[in-house]
Image (cartoon, rainbow, N blue to C red):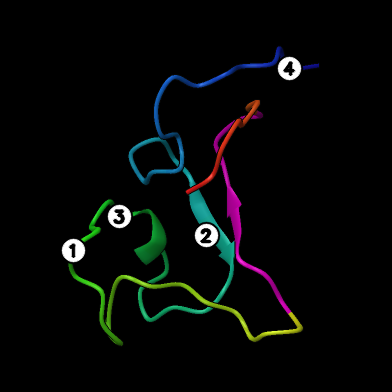
Amino acid sequence: MFPSVVPAENVATIADCASVIEGVSRSRNALLNGDTKNYDWDSGYTCHQLGSGAIVVQLAQPYMIGSIR
């Protein structure tokens, strides 16, 4: 069993080997690339259809997550 790790900083990044495994975007890991300024139809977003589906981010290891923004 993995020990519980509480991260001190964002672990949902490409550099930390996180990946978007469910959701719709034109760029597979647009949600994780760290760019918070350039959002348009071609980049910077991930979505799902209301009432079905989800946005799922797989982290590199189990973490105890206290907040998601």
Instruction: Say what secondary structure mark 4 lies in.
Output: loop
Q: Determine the CA span between mark 2 and mark 4.
A: 22 Å
Point 59% across, 62% down: residue: 21
Left or right: 29, with 59 as reference point = left
Instruction: Say what secondary structure mark 1 lies in.
Output: loop
Span shown in magenta: 53-62
- The picture places residue 31, in percent across and down from the top left corner, at 40, 61
The residue identified by callout 4 is 2
Left or right: 44, with 67 as reference point = left
Q: Determine the CA span between mark 1 and mark 2.
A: 20 Å
| Mark 2 or mark 4, earlier in chain | 4
Indicate the amino acid at tag 2. Answer: Val
Residue 59 is inside the magenta segment? yes
Indicate the amino acid at tag 3. Answer: Asn
Quarter of the rendering containing residue 11: top left
Instruction: Say what secondary structure mark 2 lies in.
Output: strand
Q: Nearer the viewer, residue 39 or 19?
A: 39
| Mark 3 or mark 2, earlier in chain | 2
Q: Nearer the viewer, mark 1 or mark 2?
A: 1
Point 64% across, 86% down: residue: 49
Q: Determine the CA span between mark 4 and mark 1.
A: 36 Å
The residue identified by callout 3 is 33
- Image height of 10 relative to 12, above or below: above
The residue identified by callout 1 is 37
Q: Disc number at residue 20?
A: 2
| Mark 4 or mark 1, earlier in chain | 4
Point 38% across, 54% down: residue: 32
Q: Nearer the viewer, mark 4 or mark 1?
A: 1
